[in-house]
Amino acid sequence: MNTDPSNQSPASAATAARTARYALIMLTIVYAFNFIDRQILVILQEPIKNDMGLSDTQLGLLSGFSFALVYITAGIPIAYWADRSNRRNIISGALIIWSGMTALSGLAQNYTQLLLARIGVGIGEAGGSPPAHAMISDYYPPEKRGTALGIYSTGVHIGVLMGFLLGGFISQAFGWRTTFLLVGIPGVLFALFFLFTVKEPARGRWETAEAASYKPTLRETVSLLSSFKSFWYIAAGTGLTAFAGYGSGNFAPSFMMRTHGLSMMQVGIVLALFGGGAGLLGTFLGGYIADHLGVRDKRWYAWVPMIAGIIAVPLGFPYLLLDNTVAAVGFMFLVTVMINTYLGPCLAISHALVPPAMRALTSAILFFILNLIGLGLGPLTAGLLSDYLTGIYGPDGLRYALLLVGLISSPAILMFYLASRHLPGDLAPKGDVS
């Protein structure tokens, strides 16, 4: 039943705030597991490549396209289900599936078996983010959603940080197969803890009773989103930004090993602190700054990632072209902060466009485009370019491949600018631009 939060007593409001904070922390931890299990393959690419005799193109397929294909295909029907049922239960079940399949990856004896295990991870992870986004939008009011979704999205980089650290240390000590097993099993156990301690929030808590009770069809949701030009420009911008993030990020361990001569353990530490840590900072700041500035003008939800992209593109050149490892890592930190500011603002403004019962599906459609372009094509393109350019430039082939990936993604800046031009008109018909 929908209730007006403004009518709550101070004690009830304080309890609701604590419940929301706890749920946000737990959802962020689940998202961290999501990316530990997704990105653990990235840190293990070199030993897997050497063990199974794989090419960079095969690695790109394994860590990108094949995973993204099932992830985006399963994401939309699961999100549609989540808009009509208990989202907490869906997230718990999804965590069990993807963590279990991560553990099974350690048992793979050939490329095909490992590919099938990663497809299983993708199916499970499709049930993670869209239901979580919808829950957060029911826990937090519109003016705090960018920050809340930004905090949730830091789970990406907590997961990357932990994945690089765990992957670097465990694989060097025990090998890549044991790493998959030790990383996957804890997620299954946490899923049960999450199920019994997190409350499913009332759907549409911050909207009118009529809006909260509205149950749109899939066609109605797609039809409404189709009328918002800003949404599609935002989706294109996030996809192109993710193209650079996944394309360069998935090959960052290989780049540091091949170009700068770092060991597996050194790569784990460097990328955890200066990759995962930078991404965590950028993701939080993006949502926080957009919420702060967006009070006066909602276009800041598009301007924040646009400005960050303008800063990031030129910084990519010294990051990839300098031979000095310390300087390269410093520029990598700055680039990573900038290109990770987009997720919180883009999710928050997308949810502002639609009624409560469309939010999980809206997130799924946004993530469909983001992961198709970013996760699906980014690593694959980087791998193809690396294999081709290595034949010309030798070990520097990967360096130039990653530079091209960054340049290909630069039209994201234009997409966010175009989104900002359409946002006032797309938000205005609702009669509420909050």
Image (tube, rainbow, N blue to C red):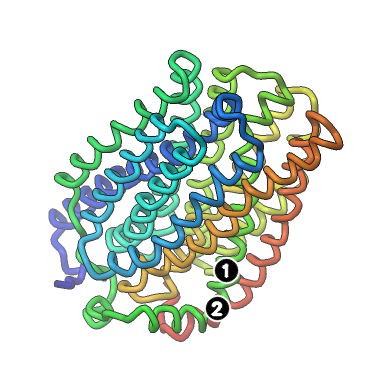
Distance from label 2 to label 1 (Cα)? Answer: 7 Å
At x 49%, y 63%, the residue is 368
* Residue farthest top in this picture: 173
At x 68%, y 43%, the residue is 383
List the residue tagged with mark 2. 424
Q: Quadrant of the C terminus?
A: bottom left
- Whichever of callouts 2 and 1 sits on the residue coming sooner in the sequence is 1
Circle 2 crowding by C-alpha within 10 Å: few under 14, some 14–19, many from 20: some
At x 79%, y 40%, the residue is 400
Pinpoint residue 6: horizontal percent, then vertical percent.
22, 68
Q: Secondary structure at mark 1?
A: loop
User: Is the residue 44 above or below the residue 19 in the image?
Assistant: above
Query: Is any atom of residue 315 visible in this view?
Result: no
Q: Secondary structure at mark 2?
A: helix
Residue 299: image tag: 1
CB of mark 2 within 8 Å of CB of mark 1?
A: yes
